[in-house]
Each structure stands twice: as C-alpha cells, then as structure tokens.
Image (cartoon, helix red, strand yellow):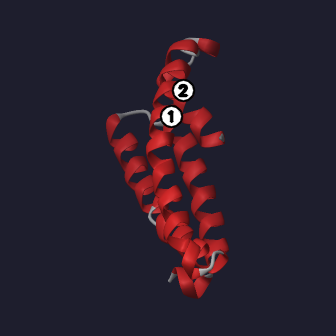
C-alpha cells in the first residue's frame, strides 16, 4: 500500500494524524476514551515505519542503505531517552498551568510538536 500510494503521502498523513490524535488524548474524559484514542493512535502510527523505510530505499543507493537504516533505527533509542526526560519536565513543570493537569499538557505539547 505504501509503495502504491507513495511514501511522501503516507508519511504526511501518518504524521498529521499522529499529532492530531496525540493532542486529542488530552481531552479524554475517562479511561475508555483514552484507550480508544490510544488504539486509534497506534493505527495511525502503523504507516510510519514502512513509509520511512521505503523513502530511505528510494533516496539512498543500495551500498549506503544498510548504514542509513542503522542510523534511523538508532534514533528510536535516542528519542526514547530524550523524550522521557522532556516528558517528565513537561508533566512536572506545567502541572496546574491554566488549571490543566501536567499529563494533559504532555499530550498537547507532544501533539503539537
């Protein structure tokens, strides 16, 4: 599907839906709504990885594709470390700002970013 539609279109729609759903999770009123939105977010995220791999295979020559893919795979771990630190800062630093809890701010900030 990604090859037929095009990696650029799939990534654009995936990242747009990802941000919108992530930000909308801040509006969840109960656990059921949060779980439903998280399921939809997982569905929206599903096109990201194959889209990036297809895009990399189209941009880089075959001899450089292995190292390029390795760099892309490494960024996931680095992103987890940096994302966890920033998430803690957002939840603690923005808790109560404008009367909104920190965990809700986390979804808003991550959705907008």
Q: Position of residue 11 (x, y in %)?
A: 61, 66
Left or right: 99 in relation to 37: right
Q: Nearer the viewer, residue 90 or 39?
A: 90
Residue at (53% x, 79% y) in the render:
2
Residue at (37% x, 34% y) in the render:
30
Residue at (53% x, 49% y) in the render:
21
Q: Nearer the viewer, residue 51 or 38?
A: 51
Q: Position of residue 85 (x, y in %)?
A: 49, 25
Question: How busy is the neighbourhood of tag 2: few (under 14 within 10 Å), some, or many (20 plus)?
Answer: some
- Marks 2 and 1: CB-CB under 8 Å? yes
Q: Which residue is mark 1?
A: 83
Badge 1 marks a residue whose secondary structure is helix
Task: Work out whether residue 100 can be spotted.
Answer: yes
- Residue 55 vs 4, above or below: the answer is above
Q: Nearer the viewer, residue 46 or 39?
A: 46
Alpha carbon distance from label 2 to label 1: 5 Å
Residue at (39% x, 41% y) in the render:
34
Q: Which residue is mark 2?
A: 86
- Residue 32 vs 74, above or below: the answer is above
Q: Quadrant of the C terminus?
A: top right
What's the mark number on residue 32? none
Q: Position of residue 13 (x, y in %)?
A: 62, 65
């Amino acid at each position: 599907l990604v090859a037929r539609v095009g990696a650029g279109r799939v990534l654009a729609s995936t990242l747009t839906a990802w941000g919108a759903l992530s930000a909308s999770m801040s509006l969840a009123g109960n656990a059921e709504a949060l779980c439903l939105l998280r399921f939809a977010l997982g569905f929206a995220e599903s096109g990201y990885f194959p889209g990036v791999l297809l895009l990399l295979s189209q941009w880089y020559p075959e001899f450089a594709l292995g190292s390029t893919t390795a760099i892309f795979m490494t960024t996931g771990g680095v992103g987890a470390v940096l994302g966890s630190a920033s998430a803690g800062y957002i939840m603690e630093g923005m808790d109560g700002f404008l009367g909104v809890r920190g965990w809700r701010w986390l979804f808003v900030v991550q959705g907008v970013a």
